[in-house]
Image (cartoon, rainbow, N blue to C red):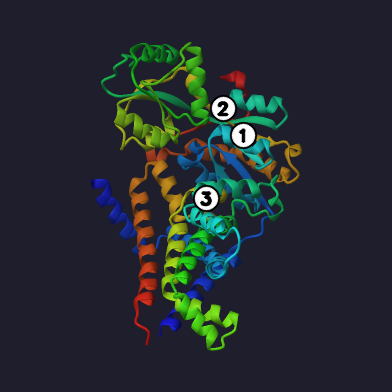
Amino acid sequence: MDVLVEGVRQAVALLLGGDREILGVLWLSLQVSSAATLIALLLGIPAGAVLALSRFPGRTLVVSAVNTGMGLPPVVVGLFVTILLWRSGPLGGWEILYTPAAIILAQALIASPIVTGITLAAVQNVPAKFRLQLIALGASRPQMVWVTLREARLPMLAAVMAGFGGVISEIGASLMVGGNIKGQTRTLTTAMVLETGKGNFEIAIALSILLLLLVFGINWALTAIQQRRPA
Amino acid sequence: MTTRLGRCAVLVLIGVALSAVAGAQAPSRTVILSTTTSTQDSGLLDVLVPLFEKHTGYTVKTISVGTGQALALAARGEADVTLCHAPALEKKYVAEGKMQDRRLVMYNDFLLVGPEADPARIKGERSVVDALKKIATAGARFVSRGDKSGTHILEQNLWKQADVTPASPWYIESGQGMGATLGIANDRQAYTLSDRATLLAFSKRVDLKTMVEGDRLLLNVYSVMEVNPANGPKVNVVGGKAFAAFMLAPETQAVIKSFGVDKYGQPLFVPIAGKKDEDF
């Protein structure tokens, strides 16, 4: 019990005291997971929209694959991305293993199916009659897709939250492709594992509180946008 | 209103994301060090690596994994230099030509620890092999790292010398680092093998007592090895050599000698640059 109390006390001290190392770790986590979420949005929204609005043979198979991908284990992604990025691997020439770029790549792969799946569901929830009406009113197909996406934008914010929440809290991929290098690729979650391994439970608890606060803050902002009534 | 806020959120996201790209550093002048968890968990590398970076201008990427993986990565040319602690395995890699120029850096020691109740009656035993035999005979619980780390490799070696094939239910494999393994041993009232540095770091959390120490078999010798450039086209030979030389330099050895005194009242490692395996 005293460990918990001490952890909370240290979390407050670390946050208020502006410990540079901790702030660096916090900032890196935020940067990496934001970049990964952004990439996932750029890939996932068009993919989800296309899947929702088109019919082609094998579509059910693709949608099933996306739904499976929503639960893609980060450690699996981490393993394959590590092997691809090895010096001896096919992407070794990029020389990004053990850098933040590698973590962004892995996290984007984790978040993309989540964004795709939620976009797919959100767009499919827009009534088909609404789309027919748009066409009837003379909208071109790109215009119809654009307006439909706009109509689905509120549920799609859930995609941002789920994608970001998924990657900022994952550990397996960050640890494997980033290497948990001090000052370079140490994120909140990998730092937490390290401090636990060192027996510094108070610091680990402090870090977990920071992580929860960060995720909460971002979800709060996004939820505020989502729940606001249209002006 | 909704869309404006939404646009703001996306812009912030893009800004933060771009700053990540801008912050990415050039990969040149980096040295990849594959090493064991104990050097990292003890905090030694947090002291030594910045010193090396300051002296040489290299950026070190420390990949802290079990000794087995550290050597396997190096053998694939995925690292430039290795610091680990499994002499028999290291010599095998050197003999195979994967690693070269193995030199001793420092040592500390392992301890056989266990619960106060000491169900196998081994406290004060001189020979760790005899103590393990007694544990097996008594069927007392023993937690193994089970992760091919240097500690695990030594432990397997000791069981072999004791002529015992450890098995469940009394033999528990944690598959985790030293700290987590000590926690499990503490919880299960079991024996385990730990390096002194990690045990000291966990002394506040675990209530395990030292049962056997001082046996020569429990010496924990760390060596530095360079990666054979033939392992892969991208091995940073010069950088690896520079790090190995740094570990053996008198100034570095002096830092190792005093490391841990301020926190634990005793040094965690004994520097031994220049010594040979035969000296131990």
Mark 3 = which residue? A173
3D distance between C-alphas at marks 2 and 1: 10 Å
Quick check: B199 above or below B47? above
Q: Residue at x 27, y 49 (%)?
A: A4
Q: Chain of mark 1?
A: B
Mark 1 = which residue? B71
Estimate the x, y position of residue B241 in percent, counting from the top left: 69, 40
Decide if residue A19 is on the left or right side of residue B88.
left
What type is the residue that disc 1 sits on?
Answer: Leu
Towards the viewer: B212 or A92: A92
Estimate the x, y position of residue A55 in percent, counting from the top left: 57, 66
Towards the viewer: A129 or A114: A129
Q: Quadrant of the C terminus of chain B?
A: top right
Mark 2 = which residue? B86
What type is the residue that disc 3 sits on?
Answer: Ala
User: Do the residues under discs 2 and 1 have CB atoms within 8 angstroms?
Assistant: yes
Q: Badge 1: few (under 14), some or many (20 or more) residues near its Cα, within 10 Å?
A: many
Towards the viewer: A16 or B149: B149
Q: Badge 2: few (under 14), some or many (20 or more) residues near its Cα, within 10 Å?
A: many
The picture quadrant where one finds residue A109 is: bottom right
